[in-house]
Each structure stands twice: as structure tokens, then as C-alpha cells.
């Protein structure tokens, strides 16, 4: 059934509306309009004061002719003095549709000041002449002055607030119709939000009520909107009052609180919106434009990163910075973060030309003062890498390029060896040969006791760069930074789930117990820079990934956030663990072999160095396998340099079949170029 409130009304605020010419005239002559209207109200207020005084005098048996002898004589004084006082208080310059408590306060103040001036005039021209037995200049009544004070405050305040009420209550409805909204929270943010919603030129939201877990707020009204209950009552309220949308007005809400609220609404087909976090609100100011959809990042509850900007600036400012994999998910964000610190030049190295084109244009538009060099280069091409480094001479190298998709690397192991091992070796050797001061490699939690080809090749890259750091003649400081999965990266779980939900499902998860660590791309990029700026060469840094998250819970939350129901609108299908995957990733940040740094979210792994001779022997063996399809030979070669590598017993070609690429949703690999 279509509700009548969804039928749009004519918009009188639009240029072609009937009242448009009048609104334009008032806007152009606002000061004159305010002056005239206020003087009319002052005149009416004084007249009402005399009428009430006259009726009281007549009831007492007195007779008075007040209109000509008193009202008309005193009116010019009242109008001139009140206009001067109200003008001084800037009450003629405000828009009435935005009238509020401050306006009422100024009206009270102006009326009180006039009353003081009036009594001062009475003192000079009535009381003093009478004291010296002279005829007063005019007659007056104390009752009229007090009544005029009350009438002025009432009439001017009512006129202003009435204009605001008219503007808010008789607004046209938006073309999309009105959405019935339940607001979660009844605090300052909710109160400010309600005021902002009422100020909208067109009505998009109709707030039906609020809920708050403070029992003392139940039954109270905020701007005419009742607090209907607590968050436990959300589902019932939504059903009884035909709620279309839930707006969470608790900027300080934690991840657990958001999860609880959304869990209470499961099955209601509601859409969720929220306000920015408190860090994003300036002085507690909330505007309707800041309302946004709740997304899965809100539910994962990552705290804002506080960088030691001085240390990062020392690393990057006025230096030549080269980023490999600059067009990937991490690479592009790394470019944005680096540009904030004013490098002398930013060198983008990327194999995919479209990605390189996009990030180059973005950086030149956003940071026009930063010199950007865009270079297409395959890091496995050693001669090309050396040519680039010889020409650019970077001071800092951030190596984000890698093959990172676990199942694909299981079936294409030789490509993982090419890119992740020998591509890294080429970039590291070039940094050493051409005198780069810093080399920062982005690694992965899958390098810890690896079970996949991808994880093991990244571990080999770590081993090589850490060993190279200790070699004589190389002044480059090599550092590696490990972290887990990032939200929203290309090929990771969130965009895959989003595509599956948009297409109607099913959402595919590899295993009900599959668990991963997550962080946002900006957070990961910032912490990589922090680790690089605070550490010494030869170290492997571990980033604090917070609490692990079940992929199944992630899928359920995303379905609910889309206004759909698990099992009814969208099914969840388990496809089976794929080759190389673990149920739980290992990313220890505590223990005897873990040391703290100056930043609470960055730790150091005390690794044992690998013999340089063994590294060279293993690399020689692996170099002969760069185009080899014999997976067993590759695994054996990798195990000789990484003994803890334990590949799955199940061969890659016996992985559970899946007709949809979305089966990859059980894994969210570390992004890179």
C-alpha cells in the first residue's frame, strides 16, 4: 500500500513556485523588511499594552482617553529607541527560518534594555519635574511599560519562531518520497540531527521516534519527537510503525554496539545510516550531508591511527620516493599518504597501464605541487628495473608489488617465484646498487609458518632482503612490514560479497570457521610508513591487526546491512577450504620473540638470520624453476630455504570445484600491485 506522505507536494521554494518572487524580494531587501515588520510588531505590542491597561483601569472605575493623548504621542519614542537597540543586537539581520534560543535571548535582552531606557526617561521627564513641583513633560503608566515588555517579547519571538515552524512543517516532499526513520540515540548528536533534518528544504526523512538505552529518557520528547523505548525494542517499533530506515545518531558507538544494533534488526529489511565518528565531527556539529550508510568497516571497529608525523616527515619530506605496485590497492593509498609529506619526487612503478594512468591523474589533480613520474615496468625484468633506478635514483623505496592471490598462486607457483621472489630481488638489488637509503617491503601474515605458495614466496623475499641488509657495501636499510587482510582491496572479501549480494546471491564462504584479521587500507598504509620511519634496517615489523573476524559473520552482517535477510533473500553457501588456506592466520604480536616499538600498534619480530650461502644456493635452484609446472619440485625447493613451509596434502588440481569466482570470498589477500 502506498502511503499518502510519499506523494510529492508542489515546491514553493523552487524558482518557478508561486511565492518565488516574494521570497526573492525579501531576500534582496532583508534589512528593510525586518525593520518594517519589527516596527509594526512594536506598534501592535504597545497598543495591546494600552488595551490591557485601559481595560484594567475601566474595571477599577477610572476613565482614560489613551489613544491620542498617550499612545500616538509615545509611539515614535518606542519605535525609534527599540529599533536602535534591536539593530545594535543585529536582530534585523537574521533569517527568521533559522530562529532559535539565541534569537529569543537577544529579544529578551533588547526588550529589557528598552525598559531600562524608558524608566530612565521617566526619571528625567516625569519623576524629577514632579519632585520640583513642575509639570511633567508627558504622562505614563508603569503597567503599560511592563505590559509592553511582555507584548514585545511575545510578538517578536512568536513571529520569528512561527516563520521557522512554517518553513519546517510545510516543506515540499522530495521526489523520492519520505522515508520513515527511527533514530537510535537521544543525546546531543540526535538533538542536533533532528534540528538539521527539520531545516531541510525538502522533506526526505520523517522521524517517527527515538530509542535510547537510558531508561530516564523514555517518554520524553526532543523537538516534538518521542523517545519510544530502548534498543531492545527496535524490532517491535519498526514493525508497529512501518519504519523504513534506522539512523544511528551515536557518533561514539563502538563496533560491538553497532553489531548489537544491527543484530537486533536482522530480518527487518531495514536500511541503516549513521553519523561520522566523533573525530570527524567538528565541535559536535552534525549536518544531514554527513549522514551515510553503515558499512562493514564500521562493524570492524578499527581505531584511528595516530602517527608520529615528525618521524614520517624525516623519512619522506623532500626526498625521492619510489613505489612499486603503485596502481594496486595498497600502492595507490601509499601514494596518497606519501604525498601528504611533501616528497621531492614520487616515482610510480606499475605493470598495469590502466591502474597507473588512474593514480597518476588523481595525484596530479590532488597534489599539483608534487612532481610525479609514471613508469611502466615489470619488476621481473631485471634490466628494466636497473635502468629505472639508475635514472631516478630514489632515496626511499616502498615495495608493494606482488602476486598475492593464494589459490591462483597454488596453481601457478612458478609465477609466484618470478614476481614475489625474483621481482623483489631485482628491486632490492637495484636499491642497493644505486644507493637508496630506505627499502620498505610490504609482506603478509601468510609468511608466518606458511601453508601456501604465496605465503612461502613472500617469506623468501623477507629472508633475502634481511640478509642483504647485513652485506658489506650495501648502505640501504631493508625493512619488512607484515599485516593481514585489508578491507575493500581488489579481489578481497568485501567487494566480492557486495557483488554477490547485488546479483541476488548466494554469498559463498569457504568454511563456517574461517577466520581472518582485517584492517582498512589507509590504516595499513599509515602504519607501514610509521614502522619504516621508526625502525632500523634488517627488521621485520608486525602490525596490530586487532581481533580476528569470522568470514561467516562478515557475510551475515553485509547481507543485513543491505536490508536483506539471510536464508530468505540471500543464501550463504560453503564451498570448502581451498588449497593453501588456513582456518586461522597466525599473526602473533606477543611473546618472547616479539619486541615493542615506540608506536603501540607496531611490533618487531626477532627473527634468526639465514645463512647467505644457503640463500644463494636456494635462489639458484629456484631460478631454474621460474617456468616449471612441476609443483612438487617447486615445493621441495622452497622447503629447503623455508623449512616451516607445510603445503596442503591435497594437490591443487583436486581443489573443490566452484562455478563462480565468488568462491574466493573466503579469503581476503593482502593487496599489492
Image: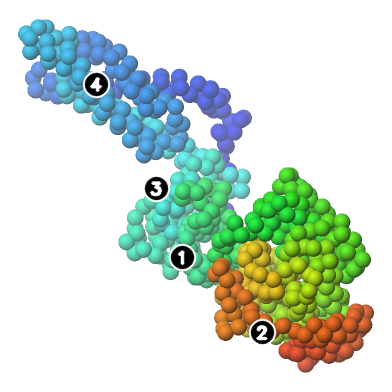
Disc on the earlier residue, 1 or 3: 3
Disc on the earlier residue, 1 or 4: 4
Which numbered dot is residue 583? 2
Q: Is residue 167 left or right of residue 455?
A: left
The answer to which quarter of the image holds residue 610 is bottom right
Gap in angstroms between the C-alphas marked 4 and 3 = 36 Å
Q: Few, some or many C-alpha atoms within 10 Å of disc 2 (few <14, some 14-19, many ≥20)?
A: some
Find the residue positioned furthest to the top: 134
Residue indicated by mark 4: 117
Residue indicated by mark 1: 234
Q: Quadrant of the N terminus?
A: bottom right
Task: Point out residue 420 in the picture as x, y percentages from the top left corner.
Answer: 81, 74
Gap in angstroms between the C-alphas marked 1 and 4 = 56 Å
Which numbered dot is residue 223? 3
Q: Few, some or many C-alpha atoms within 10 Å of disc 3 (few <14, some 14-19, many ≥20)?
A: few
Identify the secondary structure beneath mark 2. Answer: loop
Cβ–Cβ below 8 Å for labels 2 and 4? no
Say which of 573 and 117 sits in front.
117
Amino acid at each position: 500500500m502506498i502511503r499518502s506522505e510519499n506523494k510529492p507536494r508542489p515546491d514553493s521554494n523552487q524558482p518557478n513556485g508561486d511565492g518565488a518572487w516574494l521570497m526573492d524580494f525579501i531576500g534582496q531587501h532583508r534589512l528593510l523588511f525586518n525593520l518594517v515588520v519589527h516596527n509594526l510588531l512594536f506598534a501592535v505590542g504597545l497598543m495591546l499594552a494600552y488595551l490591557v491597561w485601559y481595560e484594567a483601569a475601566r474595571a477599577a472605575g477610572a476613565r482614560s482617553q489613551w489613544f491620542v493623548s498617550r499612545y500616538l504621542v509615545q509611539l515614535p519614542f518606542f519605535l525609534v529607541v527599540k529599533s536602535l537597540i534591536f539593530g545594535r543586537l543585529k536582530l534585523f539581520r537574521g533569517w527568521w527560518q533559522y530562529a532559535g534560543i539565541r534569537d529569543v535571548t537577544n529579544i529578551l535582552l533588547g526588550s529589557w534594555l528598552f525598559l531600562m531606557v524608558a524608566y530612565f526617561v521617566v526619571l528625567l521627564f516625569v519623576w524629577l519635574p514632579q519632585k520640583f513641583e513642575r509639570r511633567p513633560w508627558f504622562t505614563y503608566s508603569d503597567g503599560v511599560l511592563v505590559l509592553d515588555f511582555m507584548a514585545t517579547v511575545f510578538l517578536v519571538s512568536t513571529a520569528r519562531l512561527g516563520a521557522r515552524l512554517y518553513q519546517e512543517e510545510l516543506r515540499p516532499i522530495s521526489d523520492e518520497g519520505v522515508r520513515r526513520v527511527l533514530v537510535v540515540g537521544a543525546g546531543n548528536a540526535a538533538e542536533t540531527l533532528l534540528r538539521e533534518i527539520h531545516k531541510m528544504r525538502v522533506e526526505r526523512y520523517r522521524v517517527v521516534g527515538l530509542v535510547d538505552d537510558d531508561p530516564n529518557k523514555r517518554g520524553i520528547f526532543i523537538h516534538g519527537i518521542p523517545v519510544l523505548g530502548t534498543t531492545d525494542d527496535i524490532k517491535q517499533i519498526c514493525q508497529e510503525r512501518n519504519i523504513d530506515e534506522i539512523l544511528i545518531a551515536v557518533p561514539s558507538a563502538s563496533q560491538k554496539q553497532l553489531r548489537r544494533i544491527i543484530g537486533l534488526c536482522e530480518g527487518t529489511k531495514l536500511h541503516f545510516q549513521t553519523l561520522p565518528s566523533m573525530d570527524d565531527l567538528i565541535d559536535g556539529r552534525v549536518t544531514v550531508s554527513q549522514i551515510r550508510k553503515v558499512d562493514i568497516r564500521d562493524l570492524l571497529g578499527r581505531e584511528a591511527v595516530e602517527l608520529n608525523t615528525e618521524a614520517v616527515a624525516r623519512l619522506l619530506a623532500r626526498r625521492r620516493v619510489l613505489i612499486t605496485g603503485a596502481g594496486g590497492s595498497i600502492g595507490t593509498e601509499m601514494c596518497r599518504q606519501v604525498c601528504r609529506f611533501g616528497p621531492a619526487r614520487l616515482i610510480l612503478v606499475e605493470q598495469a597501464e590502466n591502474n597507473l594512468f588512474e593514480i597518476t591523474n588523481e595525484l596530479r589533480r590532488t597534489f599539483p605541487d608534487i612532481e610525479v613520474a609514471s613508469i611502466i615496468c615489470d619488476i621481473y625484468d631485471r634490466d628494466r628495473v636497473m635502468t629505472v633506478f639508475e635514472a631516478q635514483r630514489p632515496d626511499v623505496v616502498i615495495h608493494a608489488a606482488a602476486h598475492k592471490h593464494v589459490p591462483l598462486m597454488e596453481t601457478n607457483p612458478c609465477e609466484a617465484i618470478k614476481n614475489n621472489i625474483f621481482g623483489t630481488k631485482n628491486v632490492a638489488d637495484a636499491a642497493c646498487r644505486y644507493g637508496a637509503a630506505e627499502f620498505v617491503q610490504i609482506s603478509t601474515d601468510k609468511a608466518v609458518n606458511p601453508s601456501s605458495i604465496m605465503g612461502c614466496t613472500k617469506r623468501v623475499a623477507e629472508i633475502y632482503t634481511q640478509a642483504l641488509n647485513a652485506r658489506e657495501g650495501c648502505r640501504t636499510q631493508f625493512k619488512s612490514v607484515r599485516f593481514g587482510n585489508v578491507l575493500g582491496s581488489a579481489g578481497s572479501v568485501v567487494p566480492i560479497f557486495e557483488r554477490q549480494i547485488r546479483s541476488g546471491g548466494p554469498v559463498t564462504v569457504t568454511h563456517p570457521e574461517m577466520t581472518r584479521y582485517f584492517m582498512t587500507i589507509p590504516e595499513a598504509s599509515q602504519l607501514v610508513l610509521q614502522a619504516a620511519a621508526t625502525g632500523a634496517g634488517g627488521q621485520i615489523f608486525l602490525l596490530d591487526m586487532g581481533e580476528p573476524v569470522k568470514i561467516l559473520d562478515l557475510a551475515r552482517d553485509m547481507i543485513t546491512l543491505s536490508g536483506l535477510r539471510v536464508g530468505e533473500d540471500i543464501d550463504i553457501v560453503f564451498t570448502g577450504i581451498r588449497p593453501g588456506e588456513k582456518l586461522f592466520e597466525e599473526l602473533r604480536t606477543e611473546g618472547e620473540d616479539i619486541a615493542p616499538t615506540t608506536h603501540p600498534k607496531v611490533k618487531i619480530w626477532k627473527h634468526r638470520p639465514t645463512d647467505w650461502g644457503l640463500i644463494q644456493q636456494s635462489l639458484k635452484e629456484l631460478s631454474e624453476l621460474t617456468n616449471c609446472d612441476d609443483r612438487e619440485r617447486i615445493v621441495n625447493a622452497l622447503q629447503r630455504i623455508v623449512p616451516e613451509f607445510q603445503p596442503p596434502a591435497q594437490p591443487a588440481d583436486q581443489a573443490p570445484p566452484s562455478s563462480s569466482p565468488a568462491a574466493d570470498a573466503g579469503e581476503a589477500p593482502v593487496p599489492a600491485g
